[in-house]
Image: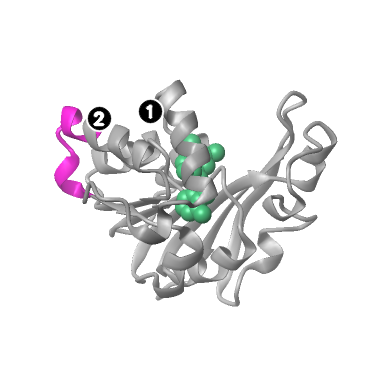
Amino acid sequence: MDDEVPPELAGHPDRLRWNGKYGTAGASFTPHRLAVRALSQPPPDGPVLDLACGPSGSTLLAAEHGRRVTAVDVSEVALALLDAEARRRGVRDLITLIHADLGEWTSAVPGGFALVLCTGYWDRAVFAPAADAVTAGGLLAWEAFTVDARRVRPRLPAEWCLAPGEPASLLPAGFTVLDQQDVPDPEHGTKRGLIARRVGPS
Ligand SMILES: C[S@@+](CC[C@H](N)C(=O)[O-])C[C@H]1O[C@@H](n2cnc3c(N)ncnc32)[C@H](O)[C@@H]1O
């Protein structure tokens, strides 16, 4: 990963906010439960795309399963933590780190991923290109806060939250929902997780 911050990200509010959080809190590298479930389906052979990865235990788990992983995040502090842990575990060669704003990067997202994973992030504009990046027979796994979470976190912007039925209702044709369920959390707010499969060759 290039150490230089791209000029377009220099003042990016998400980058500054998350760099601050990770700089203070560090990382646990615990794989997300949705990633564990998606990888155990399992997806067909092929690479994984981890969007808004953070210092991702999910990326590390996928690499430890022998998958190539492209991990994208706006925070270079998160990516540096992931970089160091991947080297320590001997899986760095399998991981491509991309420092980017998903809102921009997904306009040209490459396709052919056996699993596209996104946890802890929601942007409606990113969902369709992310789904398009799933190969035939591959999986899309997503988890984000629902609008219900705003009852316990009123400052959570509505556009960061899933509306009723989302994200399954936004899937393009050719996907089958394997599982969509709410994960209640009275302290932090309800999240909703989706695993869907793109119809593959029969
Ligand atoms: C709640 S954390 C989730 C991290 C990880 N996916 C997980 O489940 O633990 C949200 C992540 O989204 C990233 N992020 C926020 N806005 C972004 C953007 N516009 N483009 C790319 N990444 C972004 C943050 O840097 C942070 O790592």
The prevailing secondary structure element of the residues shown in magenta is helix
Name the residue type under label 1. Answer: Phe
Q: Position of residue 168 (x, y in %)?
A: 67, 61
Up-down: is 187 above or below 117?
A: above
Q: Quadrant of the C terminus?
A: bottom left
Name the residue type under label 2. Answer: Glu
Left or right: residue 85 compared with residue 44: left
Q: Position of residue 110 (x, y in %)?
A: 35, 71
Q: Identify the secondary structure beneath mark 2.
A: helix
Residues drawn in magenta:
85-95
Report if the CB atoms under discs 2 and 1 are less than 8 Å apart.
Answer: yes
Q: Position of residue 160 (x, y in %)?
A: 68, 51
Q: Is residue 10 magenta?
A: no
| Residue at horizontal 71 percent and vertical 58 percent from the top | 166
| Residue at horizontal 72 percent and vertical 53 percent from the top | 162
Up-down: is 142 above or below 201?
A: above
How crowded pointer 1 is (Cα within 10 Å; few <14, some 14-19, many 20+) is rated as some
Disc number placed over residue 29 in the picture, else none? 1
Disc number placed over residue 160 in the picture, else none? none
Q: Identify the secondary structure beneath mark 1.
A: loop
